[in-house]
Image (spheres, helix red, strand yellow):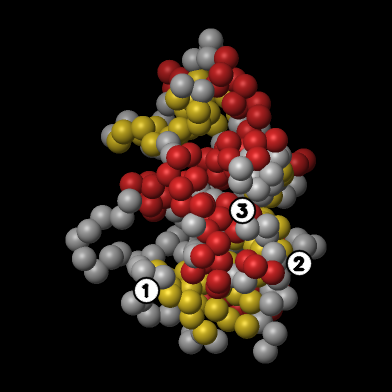
Amino acid sequence: MLNGGRDANVMIRSMNPERDNTKALIYLDSNDLNGIELARRLDLEIADRQNVPVDWHLVCHYGELALDHPASRLFTLSETSIQARLEGARESALAKACAANRRPRALDGLGGWGVDALALSSLGCEVTLTEINPLVCAMARDLCHRLGFSVVVECVDVVEFLRSSSNSFDVIYLDPIFPPHPTTALPARRMQVLESLATRDTDLGSLFELARDLARNRVVIKHRRKQSSMVRSPDWQVEGRTIRFDVFDSRT
């Protein structure tokens, strides 16, 4: 059983509950009791299934949260495949780069679906995830709940969060959307959908400098293995088979 099992709670908050405009809509039929319960648990606003937009939107698919699009097939996060990935987390390059064996307090600042945040949490790290896109954030919250991990999920821009939060973090981990791949090979569909939803106006250089000022131990940035550094030369690197983690010591 991973990190506390199914009885662990996912903590869901917004930066300012009195003016919360981060809630995503879930499109349901009026008699979809499973969907209504899902909306309640994830704090989603309910909209009529007959009024779906011509873009990605949240739906309930056999009791599970899913993303749908008029021009694409339904997308869900496979619990089984992510569980399999978490089983190898302890020996992963991510764990080594973030010094997960020390169980640091970590911020996954560009959290996406939350898979890396879950991997760190499975190793005993205290993890906060920030994700600005409400649809992606809802999917990450749901995944944390289904897998039973106590990850704090914040639907907010990471820069705003870092500037306003009183929390401190030993490790700040950043996984930006990679530039187009030099080959014609397409990434996994999970990444294709994430890229189609991603916010691309984050200035990584400014975010890195802010993170380095605030992290108590290190900042870690994920790259493709042969990709040039997106900021500056790291203090050291941890390489995986296809990816690389640049590590910056914030104590120097």
Dot in front, 2 or 3: 3
Q: Position of residue 74 (x, y in %)?
A: 36, 32
Q: Earlier in the sequence, mark 3 or mark 1?
A: 3
Could you say which disc has been placed on residue 225 in the image? 1
Answer with the quarter of the image where residue 187 lies: bottom left
Q: Alpha carbon of mark 1 to alpha carbon of mark 2: how far?
A: 29 Å
Q: Residues within 10 Å of mark 1 (few under 14, many from 20)?
A: some
Q: Depth check: give the residue in front, 17 or 82.
A: 82
Q: Depth check: give the residue in front, 68 or 159.
A: 68
According to the picture, the residue beneath numbered tag 2 turns out to be 168
Locate the N terminus and report the quarter of the image it occupies: top right
Q: Position of residue 221 (x, y in %)?
A: 51, 72
Q: Position of residue 150 (x, y in %)?
A: 69, 46
Q: Residue furthest left?
A: 184
Could you say which disc has been placed on residue 166 in the image? none
The residue positioned 19% from the left and 61% from the top of the image is 184
Q: Alpha carbon of mark 2 to alpha carbon of mark 3: how far?
A: 20 Å
Mark 2 lies on a secondary structure that is loop
Q: Position of residue 102 (x, y in %)?
A: 69, 69
Dot in front, 1 or 2: 1
Q: Earlier in the sequence, mark 1 or mark 2?
A: 2
Q: Alpha carbon of mark 3 to alpha carbon of mark 1: how far?
A: 24 Å
Could you say which disc has been placed on residue 122 in the image? 3
* Amino acid type, residue under disc 1 in the picture: Arg
Locate the C terminus and report the quarter of the image it occupies: bottom right
Q: Residue furthest bottom?
A: 252
Q: Earlier in the sequence, mark 2 or mark 3?
A: 3
